[in-house]
Amino acid sequence: MALLTKLIVAVIGLLLAFYFYSGNDAFDPSTLKEKRVIVTGASSGIGEQMAYHLAKMGSHILITARTEDRLKKVVEKCVELGAASAHYIPGSMDNMTFAKQVVHEAEGLFGGLDMLILNHIGFTYFNYFDGNVDHVRDLLEINVLSYATMTVAALPMLKKSGGNVVVVSSFVGKVGAPFTVPYSTTKFALDGFFSSLRMEFKQQNTNVSITLCVISYIDTDSAVNTVAGVIQQPAAPKEECAFEIIKGGALRQREVYYQYQATKIPLLLRDWAPEFLEYIMLKNYDVTKLKPQQ
C-alpha cells in the first residue's frame, strides 16, 4: 500500500511538472548580439557547439580548452559564422592561476563580461570505482574549484553588466549512477556550491543570475566513445543541447533540464520512489559491454 501511494504521488508529480515546465519561454537570439561571453571546454563537444551558436548570434567570444590547434579551428569557424569577435586562450583548468587568467584576458579584450559559461571537465574513467581517492581530489580541482575560481574572478564584471553564470552539470549531479563515482561527486558539488551562491545573491540583491544545466547523455565524441554501448538510451544531439544551455542562461533560468524527459521527470521519482528509479536506471546499463579499466 505504501508503494502504491508513492507511485500515485509520483504520477501526480509528473503531471504537475509537465504542466508547469513544458511551456516554451520566448527567446530572442538577437539579445546576445555584441554580448561578451567566455565558454570553457570549447575545443569540442557541447562547448564547441555553444561557440558556434553564439557566433551566429553575433557575440564577442573567448573560448578556452587544452588543445590549441583545435581552438584555432573553432575560432576561425566562429568568425566565418558572424561572431562580433572570437579569441582563444589554451591551458589546463587544474591550474587556478590559469583559470583566473582566462577571466582577466576577457577583461582586457572586451572591457567587461556579460556571460560566463563553465563547461570544461577533467578526464576520468567510466567503470567501477577503483578506490583512488587522489583521482577524486584531482578531478574536484578541475570540475569544481576552477569553476568557483573563475566565478569569483568574473563577479566584479558580471555585477556591472547584470550578467549570467551558466554552469554545465549533469543528471548524475542530481542522482547517483554506477561507473561515475568521481565524476558524479564533482557534479553534485557544483549543485551545492552554485545553488547556495544563487540564494546568497538573492539575499544581497546581486543582479547576477546562476543557471545550472542538468543534461543527459549527449552525443559528443568523448561521451559516445566512453560509454560504448553500456548505456542503452540513445544520445541526445549536442547541437540542440548547446542551444538550450545558451537559451537558459540568456533567460536567467534557475535550472535547465535537457533532455527534459531524461532528467527532470526522473528527479520526481528520486524524491517519491527512489527504489523504482534505481531499478529503472540499472536496467539501462549493459555491464557486459563495459570496457576493462586501464
Image: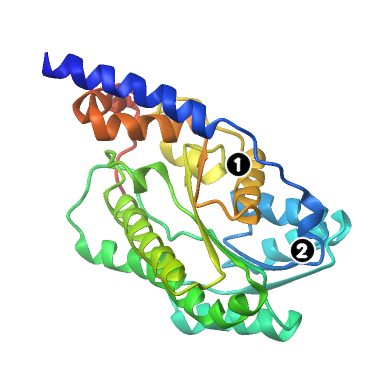
Seen at 87% across and 58% down, the residue is 82
* Residue 228 visible in the current orientation: no
Seen at 29% across and 55% down, the residue is 185
Closest to the observer, 61 or 1: 1
Quadrant of res 9: top left
Quadrant of res 275: top left
Distance of mark 2 from mark 1, alpha carbons? Answer: 20 Å
Q: Secondary structure at mark 1?
A: helix
Residue 168 drawn above or below residue 111: above
Question: Which quadrant does the N terminus fall into?
Answer: top left
Seen at 27% across and 49% down, the residue is 181
Spot occupied by residue 129 in the image (x, y as percentages of width and height) = 22, 48
Residue behind mark 2: 75
Q: Which mark is residue 103?
A: none
Q: Is residue 158 toward the left or the right of residue 96 in the image? A: right
Q: Is residue 2 toward the left or the right of residue 38 in the image? A: left
